[in-house]
Image (cartoon, helix red, strand yellow):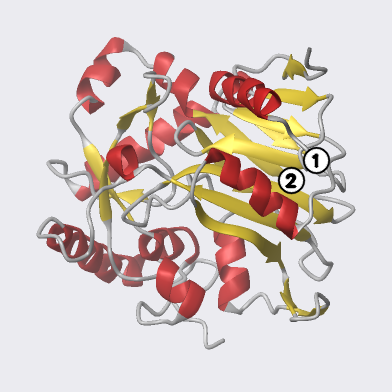
Amino acid sequence: MSDITIVPMANKAFGATATGMDLKNLGDDEFSELHAAFLNHGFLLFPDQHLDEESSIAFGKRFGDLEFGGAPMANQKKHEDGSFGKIYDLQSQLMRTNVGNETWHTDSTYKPIASRVAMLSAVVVPEEGGQTELADLRSGYEALDDATKELIAGLSAFHSTNFSQANDLGDFPDTNGDGLYGEVYHGEAYLRPLVKIHPETGKPNLFVGRHAFGVPGLSREESRKLIRSLIEHVVGDDSRVYSHDWVVGDTLLWDNRRALHRARPYDYSKPRYLIGTRVAGDPASELAYYPEDPEAEAGRKALTEELRVLRDETKDQMYGATTASF
């Protein structure tokens, strides 16, 4: 008999704390129990697990193929010997990207195949701030009035980090970058429905966030207003938002097909180090299209036009419509 205890988050529409197991030594029956709880609640908090990079990768692989695993989510450069160097300047692209993640989003909707599961484990946390917050897209959809459900039933939006960085921060990353930034800021935009049917639960969820823009069939003003109103609706009820104050050793696991998330600000001159692992989505349910597919051209055109307008609109934003030089 399992010793696992699942306690739903108090006064929340989603989420639970899971105790009574060791994620580094998890049996198949225990994992099945956790997986069922994960699908039911949308996210799970595992206190006092102290996962390292290898154990983060191993646990993530229980959910499927990884998009990446054991990655340092830090404001410092990690050296090959495991030590960390100086803290990155706020003008660097790495920190611009980190600051961008302080706005509500789901992971990898800006790639051909969106993510299914994400996980963070706390190693070094600031004394104040730096929380991770989650918001429930399922109960957000359920709380919509019938007229809005009917309005959005057949609508989609393009998703792009080039858009979200420009729109939220006035940051215009180079679309021809290499490595991480070439993968993230690639100049493509992927069309995804505003209402997503969860492939494992069959439940409808809103599917919006900071990367979403340009609803085909609507004017730019109508599209921006609609997407903004849907996000504000989801996060506007306390029962649909959970804020996690990190404690070293915590692991937080969430369903990208159901939950929005964001980081919260902290003193960027102080170190913060979380280990991140992201599980790739199933192409059968998470694939939009590939860059070489004919459908991709519409996304590129929509993004090019949107960025042209944002160049003028975002000069007063944090980064002043500029591109990082490092």
- Residue 58: percent from the left, percent from the top? 66, 49
Residue sitting at x 78%, y 20% = 4
Read off the residue under disc 1: 245
Residue sitting at x 75%, y 81% = 79
Q: Could you say which quadrant of the image residue 286 lies in?
A: top left
SS assignment at label 1: loop
Q: Does residue 320 appear in this view? A: no
Evaluate if marks 1 and 2 touch, with contact meaning CB atoms under 8 Å apart. Answer: yes
- Residue 64: percent from the left, percent from the top? 50, 43
> Neighbour class for label 1 at 10 Å: few (<14), some, many (≥20)?
some
Q: How many marks?
A: 2
Left or right of 132: which side holds 118? left
Q: Could you say which quadrant of the image residue 143 lies in?
A: top left
- Residue type pointed to by label 1: Asp
- Residue type pointed to by label 2: Gln
Read off the residue under disc 2: 131
